[in-house]
Image (cartoon, rainbow, N blue to C red):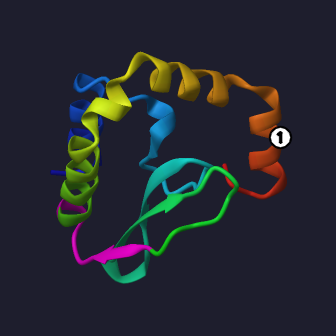
Amino acid sequence: MNKTELLKVLTELEISRGAYDLDGKSRPDCLTLKPLRNHVWQVFYTEPWGIRTPSYLFDTEEEACKFMLKSFLEHADYYQDPKVKKYYEEMCSDPKYEEICKKFNLK
């Protein structure tokens, strides 16, 4: 599994795009996949107030993508809840959210 395949599955599962980032940009309240040097992949969650939780490192893109998918599958009921989807849609379209992300270089 690679990023493109992961994106397809997350879209099919109707996981809000605001809940994850596959381009390595850390955003508040978001699970992020980030490529590092030497073909190492990092997965981490950023709390709503901008604090990163400890990250997980993987030797391959496939391992990292599978880890992210597993994380979303374990909490699918939460991420598929209409209220949660609305939260992410509103958050990502809020100009203040954009401003904060830019200010702290989170997006």
Q: Which span is picked out in magenta? A: 55-62
Mark 1 burial class by Cα count in 10 Å: few <14, some 14-19, many 20+: few
Closer to the camera, 38 or 100? 100
- Left or right of residue 103: residue 24: left
- Count every numbered label the image shows and give the total: 1
Picture residue at 21% right of the left edge, 33% below the top? 9
Picture residue at 64% right of the left edge, 22% below the top? 90
- Left or right of residue 23: residue 9: left
**Percent coordinates x, y for residue 19 in the rendering:** 46, 39
Closer to the camera, 14 or 41? 14
Vertical placement of residue 83 versus 104, above or below? above
Closer to the camera, 71 or 1? 71
Vertical placement of residue 81 versus 99, above or below? above
Asked if the stretch drawn in magenta spans residue 13, the answer is no
**Percent coordinates x, y for residue 70 in the rendering:** 20, 51
Q: Which residue is mark 1?
A: 99
Picture residue at 65% right of the left edge, 29% below the top? 91
**Percent coordinates x, y for residue 76 in the rendering:** 26, 35
- Left or right of residue 51: residue 62: left
Which element carries disc 1, helix, strand or loop? helix
Picture residue at 23% right of the left edge, 59% below the top? 67
Answer with the quarter of the image where residue 94 lies.
top right
Q: Amino acid at mark 1?
A: Glu
Closer to the camera, 51 or 17? 51
**Percent coordinates x, y for residue 20 in the rendering:** 44, 44
